[in-house]
Image (tube, grey):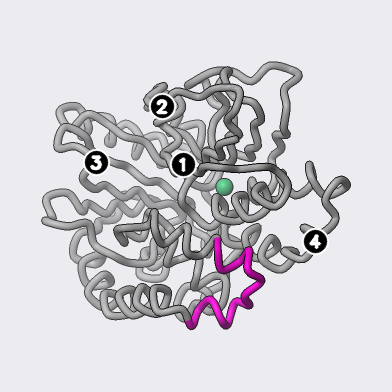
Amino acid sequence: MRLVTRGDLDGLTCAVLITSCEEIEEIDLVHPQDITQKRIHIGDDDILANLPYDRGCGKWFDHHQLTQVGDPPPDRFEGRYGLSPSAARVVFEYYMCQHPEIRRYARLLAETDRFDSAQLDLDDVLDPREYVLLGFTLDPRTGLRGFREYFFQLLEAFKAGKSIEEILALPEVKERVLVMRAADEQFRQLTRERSRIDGNVVITDFRGLPTPPVGNRFIVYTLFPQANISLRIHGGPTSEQVAVAVGRSIFNRTSRTNVGQLMAGFGGGGHKGAGTCLLLATTANDEIDFMVEQMKKDG
Ligand SMILES: [Mn+2]
């Protein structure tokens, strides 16, 4: 079978668990909109994890809000869906009785829950350690490239039973941590320069930079504690597209915006607390203004 998932920490933990319970010959890392926009063919030999439902799939595991975009899941399907802190938790609950040996990943799973649902404190953002640090090196939103090979290296390391200390000592991991730390001060500076406050919203515009800046996506909330929600704009996968990432502050938790729902209105998706969408560059500004107005109205 093939596993189709996304290249973040939750996708990695899904891959660790599913490859322990199923015969997986191939793993593909895709973006959720590759599924909803049918850019890849999904058949009954495919397991989808941490991604929207596709009616062709053999099994499906997810924890994101259901959106109007893409195939609606039927009442009965193979796999499991639930509003859980991580998709990996949903996978774990599905396989645990048949495969009690996956309990050995309990710590990885608990930390994936915490990371994927952004239950982080100030120290996790300013001085990340262990699984949180590893999660930031894998986060596609952090802007580091070449994550495919990196994802498979980490998968192999966890399957081989390596500890988090051993994994953080791998040269590829150390290198990414160094790149992240080196870029950190510059990222703060750029975030300060390119952000503006509009009511309760902090808007950061990274469009027009030669490369997407590398940095921790929660830093913005430490720099603008008065904002309860952020909207970040950067270049999309093609020059005709603009990517938007919206998130509620993890420190000032007063925003009432349902981000996943708001993003679904623009072809994207996510959770109550965070989500993304891709816009056409030609109409992006008007759509972004609309989103900001909605977030201000929600309070
Ligand atoms: Mn997830």
SS for callout 4: helix
Asked which quadrant contains residue 78, the reply is: top right
Which residue is at the front of the view, 95 or 51? 95
SS for callout 1: strand
- Per the model, the C-alpha gap separating discs 2 and 3 is 19 Å
Of the image marks 1 and 3, the number of the one nearer the N terminus: 1
Q: Nearer the viewer, mark 3 or mark 4?
A: 4
Of the image marks 1 and 4, the number of the one nearer the N terminus: 1
- Which span is picked out in magenta? 156-169
In the image, is 238 to the left or to the right of 85?
left
In this figure, which residue is indicated by the disc labeled 2?
40
Magenta span contains residue 161: yes
In this figure, which residue is indicated by the disc labeled 4?
103
- Per the model, the C-alpha gap separating discs 2 and 1 is 10 Å
Q: State yes or no: discs 2 and 3 in contact (Cβ < 8 Å).
A: no
Q: Residue at x 74, y 17 (%)?
A: 75
In this figure, which residue is indicated by the disc labeled 3?
236
- Per the model, the C-alpha gap separating discs 3 and 4 is 39 Å
Q: Mark 2 is on which residue type?
A: Ile
Q: Position of residue 118 (x, y in %)?
A: 56, 59
Of the image marks 4 and 2, the number of the one nearer the N terminus: 2
Q: Nearer the viewer, mark 1 or mark 4?
A: 1
In this figure, which residue is indicated by the disc labeled 1?
28
SS for callout 3: loop
Q: Residue at x 49, y 20 (%)?
A: 70
Q: Position of residue 47 (x, y in %)?
A: 61, 34
- Per the model, the C-alpha gap separating discs 1 and 3 is 21 Å
User: Within 8 Å: ligand 1 and the Cβ of disc 4?
Assistant: no
Q: Residue at x 47, y 34 (%)?
A: 269
Q: Mark 3 is on which residue type?
A: Gly
